[in-house]
Image (tube, grey):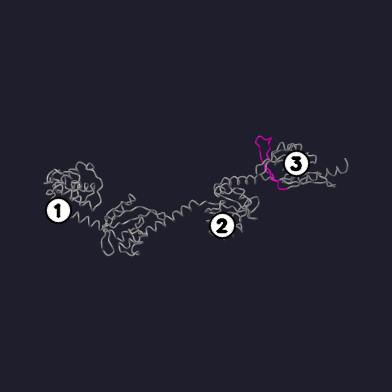
Amino acid sequence: MNQDVLTTETNRRQLQQIIAGLSDGVIVLDPDQSILWANDAALAMHGVAQVSDLGADAWDYTTRFALRYRNNHVVPGDSYPINRVLRGETFSDVLVEVTDTSDEQQRTWFHRVRSLVLTDRFDQPESLVLIMDDVTEWASAEQRFEKTFAANPAPAVICRLSDLRYIKVNPGFLEMTGYTRDQVIGTSTYELDVLEQAENKNLAKQRLLEGATIPQMQAELRLPDGGSKQVIVAGQPLELNDEACMLFSFVDIEPRYQAEMALRQSEERFAKAFRLSPVPILVCGAGDQVVLDVNEAFLDTLGYPSEEVIGESITQIDFIEDKGARMRLFAALEKTGRLDRIDVRVCRKDAGLIDCAVSADTVNIQDSPCYLLVLMDITERKRTELELVSAIEEVMKDASWFSRTLIEKLANAKNVNSPRLPSVSFTDLTARERDVLGLICEGLADKEIAARLKLAPNTVRNHVATVYSKLDVHSRSEAIVWARERGLFSGTGKSRGRG
């Protein structure tokens, strides 16, 4: 054995002694591709107990261990770090996933590998060394982050703070914006500015430069088709691959923004119609009945200044003459949510009275239920009707002396100035109510009807009220007219006419 060989062997033994206790894994190869030696750390990183388990040479190693890059692509055999170092390549920070294919459990490790080429005095490769760190725990955490980031439905991108370029984007962001991955990755925040039109853009930009948390704020994202989208954006600093980064997350508020715009336009149209309507309108809270707004027609018709109405309750204003009617009106409104043309008398500020037909409905204003009351002035119509009914009642005090023809003419005259009665059938009345109506048409008073039917006076009064309600009439004369219009009871008792 010559001196050079002895020197080489001595150097190898010394090198092995130096590196045997290192935490880094070390594999030493001969230029003839054989695996000469490995320390305990390198063996543990491959899940084996002795050097021979790594393989006799580089070829054996490539058949036993399968390598993949971080992007999950298979590492070709000639690109294995063990083969690259045999070609004399020097490299660093090659990250590979190593799987023992001979193991039923298919155990996996992640190695960060670098190479070292030791030369002799003639500058020829003497020992080829692979040095590796076990980064399995770190890589597993990175994998979990990658999976979580990709699976997160919330749109997100990550930019590197050193050059403000995007290095990751999840499917949520691509789906929300319509960008492709290639249009985002590698692009700078100046080209794709996620903080554009942010409500506090200066603060956001300052926080980005400082690598500090960016609070939630509304912003406008430019889309690849030239459009834009309203979002809520926030930034959270983090470290990724030992680099300072910023994670931007987003909430798509475009549907809400469009709904708010439509609601705002609807409210503007409502406010304009409310203000310009010639019919008095009032809006009050459903719970406390406090007046929130009235239109000019309300103020003009009732003669109130706005400061005496807005902010006051319906009870305090007391513009409905009959307190009982007011209570019944709001009780019915609370029960059904709407009313249609209920007759009430309204007091003007100057003590004058107005007959109104009140229609009401429930509306939501700023997410609070409110009542919208529309007051139609029917004073003139009511006066005409009352005058006509009064005249009819006067001449019909003793209806038995008038012919059926005259009764019908009076009824027709009444109908000219009043709305057509709703279609009510005689069969809608109960048998007892029909008896009561027949006796009314004979001209009998309540006491006489009670005696005839052997009922208590209160019971008769209740039957009469029910008949009035069902027929939509308000007096005995109107009930008689209703019956005559339909040819009822025309040949009974006193109601038999002369002509």
Q: Closer to the camera, 191 or 45?
A: 191
Query: What residue is drawn where x is 78% and y is 43%?
Result: 87
In the rendered image, which quarter is residue 355 located in? bottom left
Q: Is residue 272 left or right of residue 486?
A: right
> From the viewer's perspective, is 429 left or right of 34?
left
| Residue 138 numbered mark, or none | none
Alpha-carbon span between mark 2 and mark 1: 83 Å
Judging by the rendered image, the residue that carries numbered circle 1 is 395
Q: CA distance from mark 1 to mark 3?
A: 124 Å
Q: Secondary structure at mark 3?
A: helix
Who's the residue at 35% across and 64% down the image? 306
Which residue bears the numbered disc 2? 196
- Upstream in sequence: badge 1 or badge 3: 3
Whether residues under marks 3 and 2 lie with C-beta atoms below 8 angstroms apart, the answer is no
176, 273: nearer the viewer: 273
Region in magenta: 92-112
Q: How far apart are the two marked residues, 3 and 2, measured between alpha carbons?
A: 50 Å
Horizontally, residue 56 falls left or right of residue 291, namely: right
Residue topped by disc 3 = 83
Q: Nearer the viewer, mark 3 or mark 2?
A: 2
User: What amino acid is at disc 1?
Assistant: Val
The amino acid at mark 3 is: Asn
Q: Residues within 10 Å of mark 2 (few under 14, many from 20)?
A: some
Was residue 99 drawn as part of the magenta stretch in this picture? yes
